[in-house]
Amino acid sequence: MPDMPTTHNAAPQNDMRPKSGWRQKMPILIILVVAAAGAFFLRDKISFAALAENREALIAFRDENYLVAVLAFIAAYTAIVGFSLPGALIATLTGGFLFSTFPGVLFNVTGATLGAIAIFTAARSGFGAKFAEKLEGRGGAVAKLQVGLRENEWSVLFLMRLVPAVPFFIANLIPAFVGTALPRFAISTFLGILPGTLVFTSVGAGLGEVFARGETPDLSIIFAPHILGPILGLAALSALPIILKFFRKKGA
């Protein structure tokens, strides 16, 4: 019989390829770098004064190219949120100023939600899934907190949006780190930021008169009782399932 050809074990190919871990981390690292650069270079560029100076050009562009203006605005808002650039509040006011309270609020919430999804997806692909597994594997208080968040996921997600005690950027990272599903994150973000965004969009819709008087908008309106009360009521309603579960466990 002819000699069988000898086979040699091929050297592992993985050593010659870039580490997949770094490729997965690149999106969130890029976001962090752009956010740092934006905080330094754009802090005075996206401002109420800039909006006031360019308001006539913006209105003219909107009137001549409405659909393009809508898509460009949503894309710009998504970039501001997605890269955590300064100016999200000014962007919200601009949405109201250019497109009125409605449909401006929908454009604002859509842009903010898409930007939040970008951060969530980047964090989850780079760190979130493995981080969640490590937390669960370690046990202890941190793992219990993770389980608690998962048991009350909808309530916690809505609370983080309705009562922004947690910075918006961090509120996008926490769900990624505890393993929240993307559909839940997207829905809770869209609906959770809607009340507050509606308030500031309506302020933006009235900027024409504010510009005419040479004044600045009163953003403290969010703390007015007739505004803050319903938002806190929604927050309390979101927290109700958590409270009920707590007392049920205590009484068991």
Image: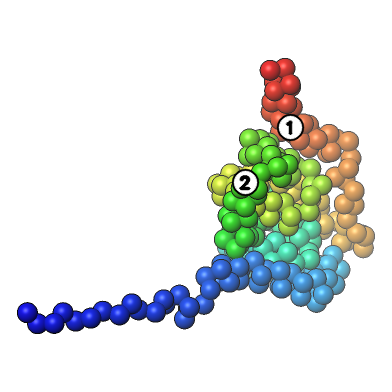
> Which image quarter holds the C terminus?
top right
Foreground residue among 245 and 155: 245
Residue shown at 63% from the left, 55% from the top: 131
Left or right of 134, for residue 33: right
| Vertical side of 207 occupied by 52: above or below | below
Classify residue 22 by image quadrant: bottom right
Q: Which mark is residue 136?
A: 2
Q: Amino acid at mark 1?
A: Ala
Give the percent coordinates (x, y) of residue 35: 74, 69
Secondary structure of the residue carrying numbered label 1: helix
The single residue placed furthest to the left in the displayed view is 1
| Vertical side of 10 occupied by 217: above or below | above
Label 2 crowd (10 A; few <14 / some 14-19 / many >=20)? some
Q: Earlier in the sequence, mark 1 or mark 2?
A: 2
Q: Which mark is residue 33?
A: none
Give the percent coordinates (x, y) of residue 193: 71, 46
Q: Amino acid at mark 2?
A: Glu
Residue under label 1? 239
